[in-house]
Image (cartoon, grey):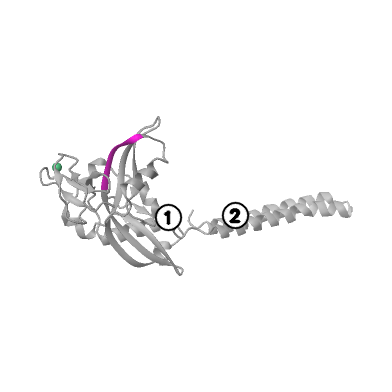
Amino acid sequence: MESEQQKSYCNQCGTQVQPYEGQVFITCPFCDSSIYIDENQVVFHYYVSPALDADGANAALFRWMSDSHSVKDLDQQARRLSTEFLFLPIWYFRVKMAGNGETILLKPARAISVTELMNLKISASDLLPYHRDLGLEAALPSVPLEAALGWLTEKKIVGVPLETFLVHIPIFIIKYNYQDRIYSAVVEAGTGKVFANFYPMKSEGAYLRIAGLVALIYLGLALIPVLAALFGNNATGIAILISAVLAGLAFVPLFLLAKRTAGKP
Ligand SMILES: [Zn+2]
């Protein structure tokens, strides 16, 4: 490794910037641009302003919980454990896609368990120049730009990115407890959108049990005329009738059971 620090230049005006050791977030002394000094590149540095406070974020999460994609009454039964705010650094790439025009791709510049967050849509108009007052809550990037660019090559992009930014996005990480398990969700504080990789979903097991029960009952009913024919007591016609009537009767309770399992209509 080189002992002497590499020279860095503002990518807006070209002025040489002289960060003190370990400093990576810089305001250019000449043109006032907010820049980030990565190991091998200087990029513009932005942030997204939070529109929600902690109460707003918790409310957004509980509204999301009351939606039908999670278990019934999750919003009633979940117990919130903690709400933590931070500005999460992400790499923001504007790229050309093969045949598809341009798109924005995001890659966390720091490990985060809720990877769903990268489906976030950030509009260029939401990007504000980073300023040092955000410093305390702005996490330092730990994923170098080079690693993020390596990830980009797996996508169908053409050439180098048209723009590369470091963006700090405001998030609340909310941990909650449901039936003795701990879950994490992220509320993006710019939009109030909720992201979660894992959350208590309606149990698949319950659906499978009902499907199995229905299959068994109808198989049994279908066997009645078959058995009648095997015993050869000329009752096949009556057996088919009994089977059909029972099948009809079974339909309603089975349907109601399935509907109850599904929770909300
Ligand atoms: Zn400058």
| Residue located 26% across and 47% down the image | 166
Query: Which residue is more in the foreground, 263 or 132?
Result: 132
Residue 77 is covered by the magenta coloring: no
Answer yes or no: disc 1 within 8 Å of ligand 1.
no
Looking at the rendered structure, the secondary structure element under dot 2 is: helix
Q: Position of residue 196 (x, y in %)?
A: 40, 55
The residue that label 2 is drawn on is 255
Can you name the residue that lies furthest to the bottom here? 180
Query: Which residue is more in the foreground, 46 or 221?
Result: 46
Q: Quarter-wise, where is residue 122 in the image?
A: top left
Start-end of magenta stretch: 159-166
| Residue located 14% across and 46% down the image | 28
Looking at the rendered structure, the secondary structure element under dot 1 is: loop
The reply to whether residue 256 is in sight is no
Amino acid on which the number 1 mark rests in the picture: Asn
In front: label 2 or label 1: 1
The residue that label 1 is drawn on is 197
Amino acid on which the number 2 mark rests in the picture: Phe
Q: Residues within 10 Å of mark 1 (few under 14, many from 20)?
A: few
Above or below — where is 201 with respect to 35?
below
Residue 17 in the figure: left or right of residue 263: left
Residue 165 is covered by the magenta coloring: yes
Q: Position of residue 212 (x, y in %)?
A: 65, 57
Dominant secondary structure (helix, strand or loop) of the stretch shown in magenta: strand
Query: Which residue is more in the foreground, 132 or 39?
Result: 39
Can you name the residue that lies furthest to the top here? 99
The reply to whether residue 151 is in sight is yes
